[in-house]
Amino acid sequence: MFRPLAIYIGLRYTRAKRRNHFISFISLASMIGIALGITVLITVLSVMNGFDYQIKNRLFSMAPQVTITNSENITSWSKLAKHVEETPTVVNSAPFVSGQGMVSSAGVASGVFFTGILPKAESLISTVGTKMLSGKMESLTPDSFGIVIGADLAAHLGVSLGDKIVLIIPEVNMTPIGLVPRYKRCTVVGVFQTGGNDGLDSGAVFLHLNDAQKLLQLGNKVTGLRIKVKDLYDAPKVSTSLREKLPETYSVSDWTENYGTLFKAIQMEKRMMFIILLFIIAVATFNLVSSLVMAVNDKQADIAILRTLGASPKTIMGIFMVQGTVIGLFGTILGVIGGIILAINAPYLVNLIETLFHVKFISSSIYFIDYLPSKLELADVVNIALISLFMSLLATLYPAWRAAKTNPAEALRYD
C-alpha cells in the first residue's frame, strides 16, 4: 500500500465524490476564493511596483539625487568633484549653473528655469540626453548660445529646431540710457520630452555651462554640483556623509527633501493594499475551516473504523491536514497562474477598455504617466504563495485536531 497512509487517504478524500454535495461546494468555493485573492493581490502589487518603477525612472533619471551648492557659488568645482567622488557609493558628479528667467518668441513669453551644463558630464548623471525629440545635447557648445528646450515649451512658443528665441534673466546692465534687462538671443538646438507632469517639458531649458556663466557674469564659478549615487535610496546617507566632510558654507540636499513624501506614500499604499487584500485569502481559508469541519462530521464512521484498525490520532490528523493542504495548494497554484497572466496583461486590458468605452483612467496631468504600468516581481509572487500555503495549513489544524479526538465507540454507536 502507498506510504505514508495519511497522505494516501487524504488524497483519496480530496478527489472522491462526497455524499454531501454542500461540503464539496464549500471546498470548491474555498479554492476559488484563495485563487481569486492571490490573483488580485499579485496584480495590485505589480501595478504598485510599476508606478514605483516608472516614477523612479522618469523623475530621478532627470532630477538630481544629491546636490551640493554654496551661497557664494563654487570656484574650484573640479577639485570639489574629485573630493566628492571619493565618497563610497558616489558614481559621478557634474557642475551646473542655474537661474530663473523668461523666454520669448514672436510676442509669446514664458517663465523658465534655465540650467547651464557640460553635456558630456551631464550624460553621466542624467538621462535627459536620451529624451530628445529633435537635435541633441552635444550641440550645446561654448559661446554658441544654443539652447535645448522642452516639447511643451516649444509648442507654446511655436518654435522648432534652428529657430531663435530670446532668453531674459532678472538682472540688469547699466547703460547710457539707464538700466536695461540682461538678455541674449539663443538658437534652439534641441527639443526634449520627458512625458511627465513635473514641469520639465514646459519650464526647463538647458544652455552650455560657459554660456550660462557669461549670462550671469560668474566667471569660472558654478552654482553647484549634481551627484549620482549607486543606489537611489542611499542618497540620504551620502548627503549626511558629505555634510560632515565639507565646510559649513556648503549646503547639501538630496531627493528626499522634495520627493520623499511621494515615495513614502507609494510604499504605504503598497503595504496597506497588501494587508487589505490578504484578508480575501484569509476569508477563503475560513471557508476551508468550515468545509473541513463538515467533512470531519461527515466521515465520523470512517474515522472510527480507521481507529479500530489501528490508525493513530496522529494519522487521522494527518489525513485531514493533507486534504485541506491540497485544496489550498491547488487554489494557490491557480491564483499564481492567474495573477501572473493578469499582471502581465493588465496594461493591455486597461488600454482596451479605455479604447472601447472612450474613457481615461490615468491622466498625465495628475500622475507622472498616462497609462497603467505593471512590473511583476518574483519576490512578491513567492511571498504571496508562501503566505497562502501557510494560511491554508493553519486552517487545517483545528478540523484535523477535532478528527483526531473522535471517539470510535461514540461514532459507531448508531451505525
Image (cartoon, rainbow, N blue to C red):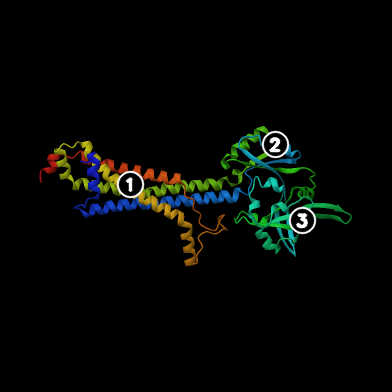
Q: Is residue 218 above or below residue 169?
A: above
Which mark identifies residue 82?
2
Report the Cα–Cα distance between label 1 and label 3: 68 Å
Q: Position of residue 75 (x, y in %)?
A: 76, 39
Q: Secondary structure at mark 3?
A: strand
Residue type, mark 3 in image: Ile
Q: From this viewpoint, is residue 59 visible?
A: yes
Report the Cα–Cα distance between label 3 and label 2: 34 Å
Residue extending furthest top?
A: 245
Depth check, mark 1 against mark 3: the one in front is 1
- Give yes or no for contact between labels 1 and 2 (Cβ–Cβ under 8 Å): no
- Give yes or no for contact between labels 3 and 2 (Cβ–Cβ under 8 Å): no
Which of marks 3 and 1 precedes in the sequence? 3
> Which residue is at a point 66% across and 52% down the rendered structure image?
129
Q: Say which quarter of the image contains residue 103.
A: bottom right
Which quadrant is the N terminus positioned in?
top left
Report the Cα–Cα distance between label 1 and label 2: 57 Å
Which of marks 2 and 3 precedes in the sequence? 2
Q: Say which quarter of the image contains residue 370.
A: bottom right
Query: Which is more toward the observer, 102 or 309?
Result: 309
